[in-house]
Amino acid sequence: MTLTLSAQEIEQQRSIQWLVLSALPQVGPVRLAALRSLTPEWPQGWLAVLPAPAAQALQLWLDHPQRSPLYAHVQQTLEWQQKATCRYLLHPDHEHWPSLLGEIADPPPLLWAEGDIQALHSPCVAMVGSRRPTRAGLQHAGQFSAGLSRVGWTLVSGMALGVDAAAQIAAMDAGGRSIAVLPGGIDVIYPSRHAELYRRLRDEGGLLLAQRPLAVQPRAGDFPSRNRIVTGLSCGVVVIEAAEQSGTLISARLALEQGREVMALPGALSVPQASGCLRLIRDGAALVRHVDDVQAELEHWLPLATDLSPTVGEGGESVDDLEEVSPLLRWLGATPTPLDALVDLSGWPVAQCQRELTLLEIEGRVALEAGGWVRLPS
């Protein structure tokens, strides 16, 4: 009698295979991609093409899985998946595997994902910049991100301090989608002060991605590796601000190597955070001053999506209107935001943030609640 497996059971088997293959010794992303191109059958075909240590480890798994060092790793991910329907283990054979990412030279073998998986099926643009941006840089990140979100682009970034977080918050506030690629495990909030942004991305139409296994804290080498996924998912990258020796320039280089569009905002010669952008423009990056400039650079990649909301909200103030009142209002909504988070997002000193919040409270625009500040309905 032949047993017929359900689609869910088949996918679980594939997930287990990829979890095992990606954890074998002497099998990194590049070698695994090369071996996969040989289309070996599972498991005998893989045993024939793997290096000896990896083949021995795989044979142990096949013969006695519970004795294998890989057993706990596999079980941990399967249990994590079963706890929520919005959790996925993506691999190159998965229906939701992002096709653009698969085209880069060293795609990750696995991605842990949580949130709205449909975000991977819309055109994506990356936005990166300084972790210590100027006030103007924060404003530009918000304006460009919100504008691109309104016309259907999904915003990809790394949930880092500064420009990353500003862009992702603005995308969500504009009714759009945003994808955050985390440097550690998907259950590790990094930086920890972005717990609320992490929750919004997971629960309000965004998507969290990670290439590192569960519970793994990020290491120094994980950040450039994370950046290659940010750019690999995207048609192009917009550099908001970058100092001359900024890590942001690594993302721009990766995008060029991947054949993506690189765009940069010009800035004043006297501003250190503009020097990297000016060098990118000198070296051939597209100079962009408006959202329309970004669209023009990307229009040959994919037609713009039309399934996202074109407005910030019904009957409310637009993001630009709020910005005229105070930049802090961009980062505030119905969910309380702690003062230290506003300090990080705005780049302002604590005292300046406190003075601004006091004025906004007097005007009836914000209120202090348990857990932080909220924006009141206009």
Image (tube, rainbow, N blue to C red):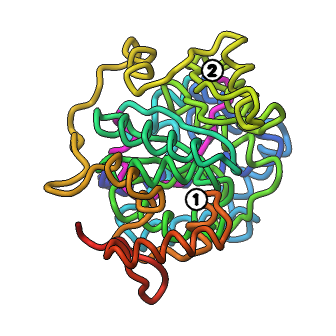
The x and y percentages for residue 307 are 21, 38
Is residue 167 shown to the viewer in this render?
yes
Left/right placement of residue 347 relative to residue 334 reads right
Q: Which residue is mark 2?
A: 258
> As displayed, is residue 236 above or below residue 66?
above
Left/right placement of residue 288 relative to residue 177 reads right
Residue 355: image quadrant is bottom right
| Stretch in magenta | 104-122
In the rendered structure, does residue 113 fall within the stretch colored magenta? Answer: yes
Q: Are marks 1 and 2 in contact (CB under 8 Å)?
A: no
Could you tell me how far apart the alpha carbons at marks 1 and 2 are, in whole angstroms?
A: 30 Å
Q: Residues within 10 Å of mark 1 (few under 14, many from 20)?
A: many
Which type of secondary structure does the marked residue at label 2 adopt?
loop
Residue 227: image quadrant is top right
Q: Residues within 10 Å of mark 2 (few under 14, many from 20)?
A: many
Left/right placement of residue 32 relative to residue 337 reads right
Q: Residue at 63%, 24% (x, y): give it.
A: 255
> As displayed, is residue 73 above or below residue 132?
below
Residue found at the very far bottom of the displayed protein? 370
The x and y percentages for residue 316 are 20, 57
Which label is found at residue 232?
none
The x and y percentages for residue 320 are 35, 46
> As displayed, is residue 303 above or below residue 305?
above
> As displayed, is residue 374 above or below residue 208?
below
Left/right placement of residue 229 relative to residue 96 reads right
Quadrant containing the N terminus in the rendered view:
bottom left
The x and y percentages for residue 282 are 71, 12
In the rendered structure, does residue 354 fall within the stretch colored magenta? Answer: no
Is residue 65 shown to the viewer in this render?
no
Q: Residue at 22%, 44% (x, y): give it.
A: 311
Q: Which residue is mark 1?
A: 345
